[in-house]
Each structure stands twice: as C-alpha cells, then as structure tokens.
Amino acid sequence: MKVLVTGATGLVGQAIVKVLRQKGIPVNYLTTSKGKITSTEDFQGFYWNPAKGEIDLDCFENVQAIINLAGASIAKRWTPNYRKKILSSRINSLRTLRKGLEQSGNREVECLISASAIGIYPDSFSEYYDENQTKMDDGFLGEVVQKWEAEADTFEKLKIGVAKIRIGLVLSNNGGALPKMAQPVKKFLGAPMGSGEQWQSWIHIEDLAQMFVFAVENNLKGVYNGVAPNPVTNTKMIKELAKIMDMPLWLPNVPAFFLKAILGKMSTLVLASQRVSSKKIEEEGFSFQYVNICQALKSLYDHHDEEVPESVKA
C-alpha cells in the first residue's frame, strides 16, 4: 500500500507521516513549497498549487489511499480576506485532488480520509455530541466544516470510500493551541478563559495520527470524531497544565468581553463549548493511548526538547 498525504509538512501531517513510515508504508506527499520536496524510495514529495488548480499527476502513481489535511490555519485573525482563505484553501485542495485523480487514470485508490473539525457542532454547555447530530453550528466554523465535508463527499462519485475525521483540540508541544495556552501559565499569568465552564474536546497528537492510519488500514467510511474519550472544561485544562508545570494559578478568569475585543470572531475558538463523544471510533476497534488529560499533558511536558516544526500549512 502507498498513501498520498496533503498537508504532510504541518503539525498533524508530520505526526501521521511518522506513523506511516514506522509501519513501513510508503508515502507520497504534496507540498506548495518546491523547497520542501524530498525524494527517497518510500518518501516522495510532489508540487501542487491548489489555489491555481495545479498538481503533479505523478503523485498518484501506485497510490491506494489519500489522507487530506490541507487547509489554511484557523488560528490567525479572521479578517474578511482571511476567512475567504480558510474556506477556499480547503475546497480548492479537495477539488484539485479530485480533478488530478481523474486525470491521472489511477483506479487503485480505495479511500479518502479527510480532516474535518468539531466546529461543526453547535456551542453548548449541556449537549453531548456524537456523529449522528444533525443540528449544525450556524457560525463561520459551522459553515466551513459543512462545505469542507460536502466537497470530500464528491470523491464517492469516483467509487472511493470517504471518511471524515472531525478533529478536536490537538495537544502537542510542537505547535497548535497548547504552547499558546502554556505560555501565560509559565509567566504566572495563567487563567481560565471566559466562564471556564466551556467543554474542550481534546486529543493527543499521537492518538490522532494513529487514528488517521487506523482509518486507512480499515478502509473506514463516514464521519468519526477525532477526540479523546474524556473531554474537560477549560478550567480543568488550565488547572492540569499549571499542575504539571508546577506553576500557581492566582489570576481571575479572563473575561469573555476582553477576549472578544482582542480576538474578534476568532474568540469562538477559546469560548465555544463542544462536548464530543469518541464512542464510534472505539466501537470500530480503535484504542486510545491517552484517555485522560493529566496523562496526556504529562507525556507532552516530559519531552520538552523536541524540535519545533513549522505550523500547519496547506
């Protein structure tokens, strides 16, 4: 089996590539940066530019599965222009992939495993969401995820099985949200955000990488939540972080109005509450290595000296 990965140089992509290579599965990857193209027998880079619909068709050679992680980071200020980029980068990546696959003549691809996000679920302190939830978030993130998943589903027309993994808060000390949450704690400025009661459905980066590879190996189809079994409140998350870093928490909560003033609409990333179930993927036979927040944070902050890669790129 050979797997084609988009977004392979990003935070989650690097973790997935590592798992694939550990299992001896050859990887082709697409990158928008010609300087990031490397070429070995089992790890081969190819150039693409989804904004222009350009793709090197050789990337599909002998590929049986595609993992799609491409899309502009949502962790930048949501100006009107950047909001367009968040959406278009995800749609254009999938369209370019699909058209390229059709042109390549490859008929071996059996599955597409595409990243998605739990931002599709409405903000709620009381609901416990599983994949059967039909009510969708009516904000920007809900719109992005619905269009993103609909575009992934178009691969079914090519007789390809499609799975969408709705990713929660990814815990890694190499990038993403966690280092940003840890920074104020390190500086004695840690505090819960808003009420602190909002649910955060998190997942350890290693479990997420294993989940994507599990989905490929088992040819999964449909929607799966990429979250660990035990969501926590924001207050619990910050308290556990402070405990592991052996730092005091003495400041009052950061008021929601203050976060909205600084972050604008992007404040939804820290204030939205989504308690999400992982049961469906567990019922498929997937087992998590990190099921509770203390264990997950401890594993990350016992490995301080890992190299910091670049943040997620399309």
Image (spheres, rainbow, N blue to C red):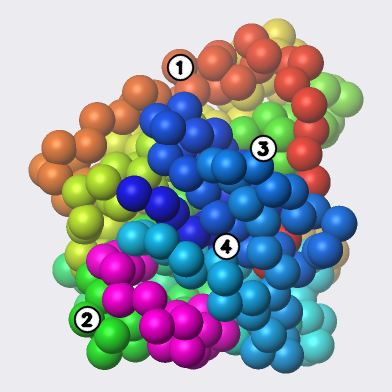
Image disc number at residue 6: 4
Residue type, mark 1 in image? Gln
Q: Are marks 1 and 2 in contact (CB under 8 Å)?
A: no
Q: Is residue 65 above or below residue 42?
A: below
Tell me the residue that label 2 is attached to.
Answer: 159
Q: Is residue 180 magenta?
A: no
Badge 2: how crowded within 10 Å, few (<14), some, or many (20+)? few
Q: Residue at x 47, y 28 (%)?
A: 22
Residue type, mark 3 in image? Leu
Badge 1: how crowded within 10 Å, few (<14), some, or many (20+)? some
Q: Taking the image as drawn, is residue 219 in sight? A: yes
Tell me the residue that label 1 is attached to.
Answer: 295
Q: First in sequence, mark 4 or 3: give its number.
A: 4
Q: What is the distance, in whole Å, between disc 2 and disc 3 at their CAs?
A: 39 Å
Which of the two residues, 74 or 105, is positioned nearer the viewer here? 105
In the image, the segment drawn in magenta is 95-112
Label 2 or label 3, whichever lies nearer to me, is 2
Badge 3: how crowded within 10 Å, few (<14), some, or many (20+)? some
Q: Is residue 98 magenta?
A: yes
Residue type, mark 2 in image? Lys
Secondary structure beneath disc 4? strand
Tell me the residue that label 3 is attached to.
Answer: 178
Q: What is the distance, in whole Å, between disc 4 and disc 1 at their CAs?
A: 30 Å
List x then y, in percent, for residue 199.
44, 48
Q: First in sequence, mark 1 or 2: give its number.
A: 2
Q: First in sequence, mark 4 or 1: give its number.
A: 4
Q: First in sequence, mark 4 or 2: give its number.
A: 4
